[in-house]
Image: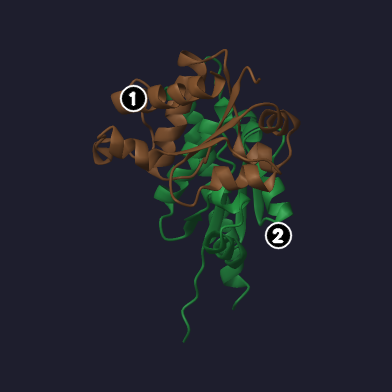
Chain colours: A green, B brown
Amino acid sequence: MEEQDFKVAVLPCNGIGRLVSTVVRLAGYKIKEMRPDQVVLLSSGRLAVQDSEHKALFEKYPVLVIDGCRPHCASFMCDELGKTPAARLYVADVAAESKIAVGGEKRRGLTEKGHKLVDALAKKAVEEIDRIIADEMLSTL
Amino acid sequence: MADKVCLQPCLGLRKEAVLGRQALYVVHEDLRPDTTVLGCGPALNANVQEDVDFINMYPVVAVEACELDCATRLVDKKGNKAAVTLRISDLVKSLRIDLSSLPEHEIDTGEPAVQAIAKRIAEQVDALLA
């Protein structure tokens, strides 16, 4: 029997301008650590220029988008490439839901407060990843 | 003559990208706050006006983590040309930085390697504005 390849491609915006950019970037690494065999971490830089290897991964797997700030640039990238994400996360939603305040944190380096938001975002992402994979698996039965 | 330079990093995931990103915070916030702007790749790709303005108004220093040169190519995609492309891997070599000794995902901006790279990028900013 052919072995199924159930993975989720995670596309964090990986911006640089804001505190949430750092939160998203670090959450991306943490998500990969938490689900090493189920996650393909996409680079927004490579995808923006449609690097063929990266685009193939983007096209192959369901995509979880993580947007840091209001322009929702990772979502834009998905739209630009013609794919509807399987799920989207927005940092402000996670911050509100988890009641984590990050005032005083700096984009160049997080303290414990910022890392709490990274952890909350990664946890939420992993829940979505597990749901997406379960949905994919069950749809094959 | 431009009075500022746009710093445009690749924003990839590898260690060189993290090193470049941290160095750019040092250049923009500490070394050359009045003569640099920090361009965000995904925002530029999404046509966020501020980031589009940055590459149209100022000469661009693209800071790349690898040979794919995604920041340079993104500036091309948006109809402009980077004035200079710097590769972190080249700077690491010329500054004799031991990349393996640096943490993978979080590098402190006070780290000597970050400071040394930032200084080189700041020199490039000065050269473009001279």
Taking the image as drawn, is residue A108 in sight? no
Q: Residues within 10 Å of mark 1 (few under 14, many from 20)?
A: some
**Is residue A11 placed above or below A24 in the rendered structure?**
below
Identify the amino acid type marked 1: Ala
Q: Which label belongs to residue A101?
A: none
- Seen in the picture, residue B48 relative to A10 is either above or below; the reply is above
Vertical order, A87 against B23 (above or below): below
The amino acid at mark 2 is Lys
Q: Is residue B19 left or right of residue A83?
A: left
Side of A125 where B97 appears, left or right: left
| Percent coordinates x, y for residue B104 in the rendering | 34, 40
Q: In percent of the image, x 62 and y 50: which residue is there? A: A48
Q: Is residue A121 visible?
A: yes
Residue beneath disc 1:
B116
Q: Chain of mark 1?
A: B
Q: Position of residue A23 (x, y in %)?
A: 52, 33
Badge 2: chain ID: A
Q: Which of the two residues, B130 or B95, is positioned nearer the viewer here?
A: B130
